[in-house]
Image (tube, rainbow, N blue to C red):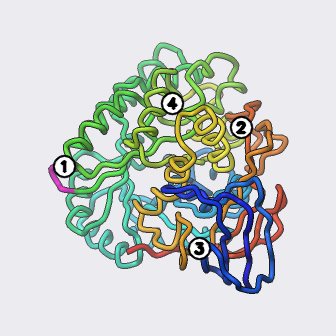
Amino acid sequence: MITRITGGKIVTASSEIYADLWIKDEQILKIGEADFIADMVIDATGKYIMPGGIDPHVHMHLPTPAGFSSDDFRSGSIAGLHGGTTTLIDFVTPEHGQSLIDALDKRKNEAVNSLVDYTFHVSPIEWTENTASEIEACMKAGITSFKVYMAYKKAVGLEDDALYNVLKTVGELGGMVTVHAEMGDEIDLLRDEFAAKGILSPTAHPQTRPNYTEGDAVKKVIEMAAENNCPLYIVHVSTAEAMSHIQLAQKNGQKVWAETCPHYLVLDDSVYEGEFADTAKYVLSPPLRKHKDSEALWQSLKSESVQTVGTDHCPFTLEQKRAGEHDFRKIPNGAGGVEHRIALLYTYGVLEGKITLSQMVNMMATAPAKIFGLDKKGDLREGLDADILIWDPNTEQEISVATHHQNTDLNIYEGINTKGATAHVFVKGQEVIRYGELIEKPKGEFIERY
Ligand SMILES: [Zn+2]
């Protein structure tokens, strides 16, 4: 089966050119003039042809005390496809006492209903005499990145000595540590102080996670990673303070990468004032910040000191959020976004002149592929998987729960207008989305990374 995509502008992280793109079966056959006989021709006149999005940070079917996050791998991958995302990186979070490799096997079973290819960051949540060998076994099973939490210490967070051991072990084995950097103990103290004063609404959420609790954690983990010579990727960076620590480390030549999320770029902390039903959906961590933080993040994307944009997609329903109606500490943290990442970056980044189109492609696909070793994805070149997004810049829409595909009755971007939309999405050579319709249901596969 040969498909020819013709008439459009091919946009990669390094160039914009008008050329034909040819697909044979699952792979990109050629870019440029050729005389293959096409079984299907897609007219992409007036559109951009880009690599399918890679979202490096999603939580499908995540267990919490308020139930599972409301998208599973099937509904979440469908939502992602509608927004142009064709690869997901999710997480493996073991139970206490469970081995990492057992947890990885179980997670692979939960992901079999994904329509797109996927891989995982594996989370050591404790340090036992077996953890080093379990990390090594995960690396032999195709995992190269390990996620640690400095917050949520009562559930999955690590104490400093365990964090140190993970950085040392992963560094020695040639892997990478990704980190949720917030000072967990300080935050727990602030949360309990606010609760003791009777401040129990979502208003307390940002106030109990002030900017310095992220900045201090980022500084600390950068130092620990340097000491252990471990490559470090800092997830969901939200503050100007954190960025200054990251930029200093990068200037010093340390292997430190940073990710931010669309919600830190287009929303701010004014949303936490109001009734529970209107504010609980914004309870996600780190919290939304001030306008000056968003500006610092856009600047960091432009200067490429932030390399990737992930969504931290972790939706809940309002009913699930109501678990914390009388105590913000019980509200499940997270919000959906996998469907909106590219449209938000395009509208509020590219069209406002904050980033270039090629930079957008880099942060939403090419950089995640390079950083996390997805060798067959993230670019448009001969021999790579034909995961392709054809973007129509000439459409407009308003984000709403009434029209989104995420499995939740909440949307933190409700009412926001975006320009541009997916016209066609190809997953390994198969057209899966055509003008807003899901026309095929491919079967995603686990990607081994070495
Ligand atoms: Zn997350």
Mark 3 or mark 2, whichever is nearer to me: 2
Name which of mark 1 and mark 3 comes first in the sequence. Answer: 3
Residue bounds of the magenta highlight: 225-229
Residue, far top: 197
Residue with the mark numbered 4:
287
- Cα separation, mark 1 vs mark 4, equals 27 Å
Name which of mark 1 and mark 4 comes first in the sequence. Answer: 1
In the rendered image, residue 145, in percent from the top left (x then y), is placed at 38, 62
Residue with the mark numbered 1:
226
Name which of mark 4 and mark 2 comes first in the sequence. Answer: 4
Contact flag, marks 4 and 2 (Cβ < 8 Å): no
Q: How many neighbours does mark 1 have within 10 angstroms: few (below 14), some (14-19), or many (20 or more)? A: some
Q: Count every numbered label the image shows and give the total.
A: 4
- Cα separation, mark 3 vs mark 4, equals 32 Å
| Residue pictured at 71% horizontal, 25% vertical | 278
Mark 3 or mark 4, whichever is nearer to me: 4
Residue with the mark numbered 3:
109
